[in-house]
Image: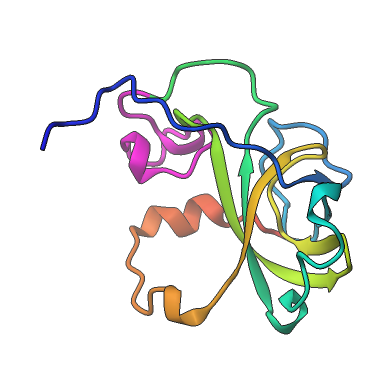
Amino acid sequence: MSEPSSASQLGPMVAVGRVRNHRTDPGDSDGWGDVVSRIVLDERFGDHALTGLEEFSHVLVLYQLDQLDERADYTGVRRPRGRDDLPAVGLFADRGPRRPNRIGVTACPIVRVGATDLEVRGLDAVDGTPVLDLKPVMHEFEPSDVRQPAWVAQLMSEYFER
């Protein structure tokens, strides 16, 4: 079996909906805890795509970080958020937005489920962000024993601050 080409192309992805909230600055990185976002589905999904989601407490939101300026600075090591008090880590040891595919994923508490939209809390995506997929959080898919370095708690202390 050969290694995939570094220039491998994937099929097209399309947005299933858009984020609507009061946050408009993609560089604003703290205080997401109380942000309630409305995810409006594309009309092609009709009014049954969210049926049953109200039975779940959380949803995984997969979205495209499309409003960041175009930069290819995701290679090499970096300090999370540019903080000198944190260790330098590689691309895949950090959840920062500068990524090759500019994809974000957040597990969000569900506030409300409608026929063609839903509201979630703590989604760290700005107004107009394209949503690529939604999946209910099921504890059978979640790890029970998460290990992380101590610096992560320090880094995230204000991120979901309410």
Q: In this view, does 4 lie to the left or right of 32?
A: left
* Above or below, 65 relative to 40: above
Quadrant of the rendered structure where residue 12 is? top right
Q: In which quarter of the image is the N terminus?
A: top left
Q: Can residue 71 be seen in this view?
A: yes
Q: Does the magenta stretch include residue 24?
A: no
Rendered residue at 83%/63% (across/down): 119
**Residue 120 in picture, x, y percent from top left:** 77, 63
Q: How is the image coloured?
A: rainbow
**Residue 100 in picture, x, y percent from top left:** 44, 28
Q: Nearer the viewer, residue 84 or 8?
A: 8
Rendered residue at 89%/44% (across/down): 22
**Residue 106 in picture, x, y percent from top left:** 60, 56
Q: Give the range drawn in magenta.
A: 75-97
**Residue 160 in picture, x, y percent from top left:** 66, 58
Prevailing SS of the magenta stretch? loop
Q: Is residue 77 left or right of residue 29?
A: left
